[in-house]
Image: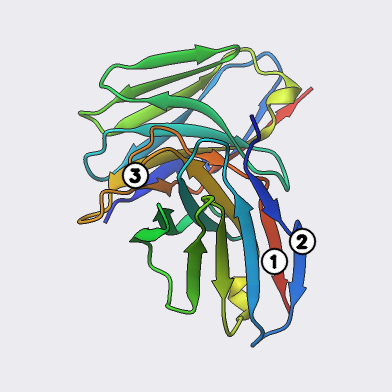
Amino acid sequence: ELKVEQNPLFLSMQEGKNYTIYCNYSTTSDRLYWYRQDPGKSLESLFVLLSNGAVKQEGRLMASLDTKARLSTLHITAAVHDLSATYFCAVTSAYSGAGSYQLTFGKGTKLSVIP
Amino acid sequence: ETGVTQSPTHLIKTRGQQVTLRCSSQSGHNTVSWYQQALGQGPQFIFQYYREEENGRGNFPPRFSGLQFPNYSSELNVNALELDDSALYLCASSFGRGGLEQFFGPGTRLTVL
């Protein structure tokens, strides 16, 4: 059974600081996703990482993937209040026999950026 | 291009009742996946429909069932509602069984009293 663990689950940081969220997964997967969710809202796709060593950046967020370690990181640079949200990583596994790709999510990291 | 839409936005039911949630997929997408997100948790995969057939199911009991229509819209039906069914239900559409990205709708907030 595929398991996805994120840490930390809660993160309070000051504006201007840097921090990293970690995502570990238990079995081989070929796709890793990062999503953002604001309170009461749906999921917004941030990054899709497909290969070992993949790195993607958008604004103050940078995501990387190490498939050998089964680890992805989401690095936040010089945080601003607008980044306050819950961040989820998700990994796909091919559903045996049917070929569908279901997403298995971590529990999420609730980020609060304090002015 | 129209995004993923869901209805209703909010719903309140009592234990034992039945509920139907609806999802319209993004234009050009033929696959719909449903997820349940309990408060404070990550979404959990319920099932996926591809070209009107179930194409994968998570660890949910049979009282969770679904349909996909020829226009690729979809319904999630839950019978004999339980208190623990209270959650945000998200649908996501994609193209093909192994579509690279799933695009999520705004969700339906179900409260079971």
Identify the residue under disc 1.
B110
**Going by the image, does B48 lie left or right of B15?**
left
Count of residue discs: 3
Tag 2 subunit: B
Question: Are there few (<14), some (14-19), or many (20+) residues within 10 Å of tag 3?
Answer: many
Q: Let me know if residue A91 appears in the view.
A: yes
Give the CA distance from mark 1 to mark 3: 28 Å
Q: Which of B9/A51 is in front?
A: B9
**Disc 1 element:** strand
Tag 1 subunit: B
Identify the residue under disc 3.
B97
Q: Quadrant of residue B54?
A: bottom left
Q: Where residue A3 sits in the image (x, y, percent)?
A: 33, 50
**Disc 3 element:** loop
Mark carried by residue B10: 2
Q: Residue at x 62, y 42 (%)?
A: B4
* Discs 2/3, front: 3
